[in-house]
Amino acid sequence: MSEAPALLVVVGGPTGVGKSTLVNTVVGRQVSDVGVLRPTTRAPVVIHHPGDVPPPMSHVDEATRVVPDEGCPPGVILIDSPDLDSVESGNREIAEALLDIADVWIAVLSPPRYGDDAAWQVLRRAVARGRATAVVLARVTDETAEVSTDLARLMREEGLGQAPLLVVPHVDQAAGQLPDEAIDEVRRLLMTLSEYPEARAEIRASRA
């Protein structure tokens, strides 16, 4: 199946920006809890294609939940992270530790939260460590569409000018998922990693 090792793709960001909803939509079913009570994600949720073997995660958090699912692209192991700004310090520590093992970090932000210091501290660490990074601006409405321009400016200023900026519109959701077309840009990125082993190998080599 995979001519290069599967990549650990960590989906992280501040509370309430839609990380778990994004992961559920990629997989095609609710594999990670969503809700209004915070924090919702209290331990990492690791989703992998049955043909891939995820690494042991007990050193990050013994409560990690591992979910094999055909909906996860082969060659990509998705990790839904606790909030970077969780009110629980243990959750914050887990979220930051996940950056240390990530091959790719997908930072999920929202128009009200795109300038959050907790997220940008980790983004700066990702840049300093040479991590492959993408930024998702989620829950974008017509009224907040201009936020993407300012976010792109911030990314350039912080050394992330070459990182993908992917926009997910604010649309009605059901069962913790968005309509599939809402995540077209995110899915294209993940499918590139899945279908091109040379891309995975290059990302892995950049970490060495």
Image (cartoon, rainbow, N blue to C red):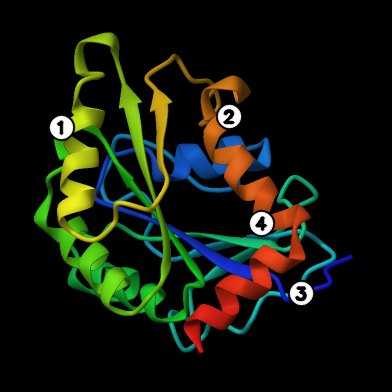
Which amino acid lies under the numbered mark 4 shown in the image of this protein?
Leu
Q: Is residue 193 above or below residue 201?
A: above
Single out the mark in the foreground, 2 or 1. Answer: 2
Q: Identify the secondary structure beneath mark 1.
A: helix
- Which residue: 54% across, 33% down? 185
Q: CA distance from mark 1 to mark 3?
A: 38 Å
Rendered-image quadrant of the N terminus: bottom right
Q: What amino acid type should be assigned to the residue bearing mark 2?
A: Asp
- Tell me which amino acid carries mark 3: Ala
Q: Which mark is residue 193?
A: 4
The span from disc 3 to disc 2 (Cα, nearest Å) is: 24 Å
Q: Earlier in the sequence, mark 2 or mark 4?
A: 2
Q: Is residue 146 left or right of residue 57?
A: left
**Which numbered disc flags the more N-terminal residue, 2 or 1?**
1
Q: Is residue 32 left or right of residue 38?
A: right
Task: Examine the rendered structure and indicate whether residue 146 appears above or below residue 143.
Answer: below
Q: Which residue is mark 1?
A: 112
Q: Is residue 37 above or below residue 171?
A: below
The residue where tag 3 is placed is 4
Disc 4 to disc 3, how far (Cα)?
Answer: 10 Å
Q: Name the N-terminal-most of marks 1 and 3.
A: 3
Q: Which mark is residue 184?
A: 2
